[in-house]
Image (spheres, rainbow, N blue to C red):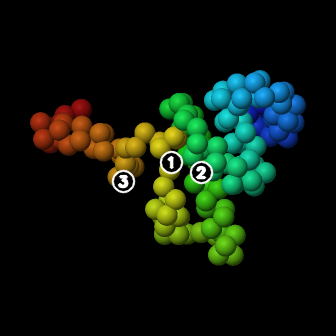
Amino acid sequence: ETLEETGDIERLGRFLWSLPVAPGACEAINKHESILRARAVVAFHTGNFRDLYHILENHKFTKDSHGKLQAMWLEAHYQEAEKLRGRPLGPVDKYRVRKKFPLPRTIWDGEQKTHCFKERTRNLLREWYLQDPYPNP
């Protein structure tokens, strides 16, 4: 986790390669969220998006990790789309990529955002507005 936070991706990759490969130990280690998150970070930074997608789609992560993993998921898809199109993506292109490749349920709570607010927040704001449309400071 420290290597991930400091951004030393090369050392993080070497550390992951140095982990034991014995069948029982390997399986136990690869179930830890910090190891899975580190593998995802290394895959993202090395451009190995197929591994990144596999990790993110097949392992459940805690809410604390969702923001960073969601950003990696979207950025990886953006980079692939840019490479295919041969030009930088504009806002509409990014919107189309997000619609084509929605976030997997393993890194998303399932709540839709509408104009930067989640549906629960929009409902709460609507209720308060109906109670007092012009509040005083």
Which residue does the image show at 29% across and 39% down from the upper left? 120
Name the residue tied to disc 3: 115
Amino acid residing under circle 1:
Pro
Q: Which is more foreground, mark 3 or mark 2? A: 2
Foreground residue among 69 and 61: 61
Image marks 1 and 2: residues in contact by CB distance under 8 Å: yes
Amino acid residing under circle 3:
His
| Among the 4 quarters of the image, the one containing residue 124 | top left
Check the image and report above or below for 104 versus 19. below
Name the residue tied to disc 2: 73
Q: On the picture, is 18 further left or further right than 94?
A: right
Dot 2: few (<14), some (14–19), or many (≥20) neighbours within 10 Å? many
Whole-number angstrom distance, CA of label 3 to CA of label 1: 20 Å
Foreground residue among 47 and 36: 36
- N-terminal of the pair, mark 3 or mark 1, is 1
Image location (x, y in percent) of residue 21:
83, 30
Q: Residue furthest left?
A: 131
Which residue does the image show at 58% across and 38% down from the upper left? 59
Name the residue tied to disc 1: 104
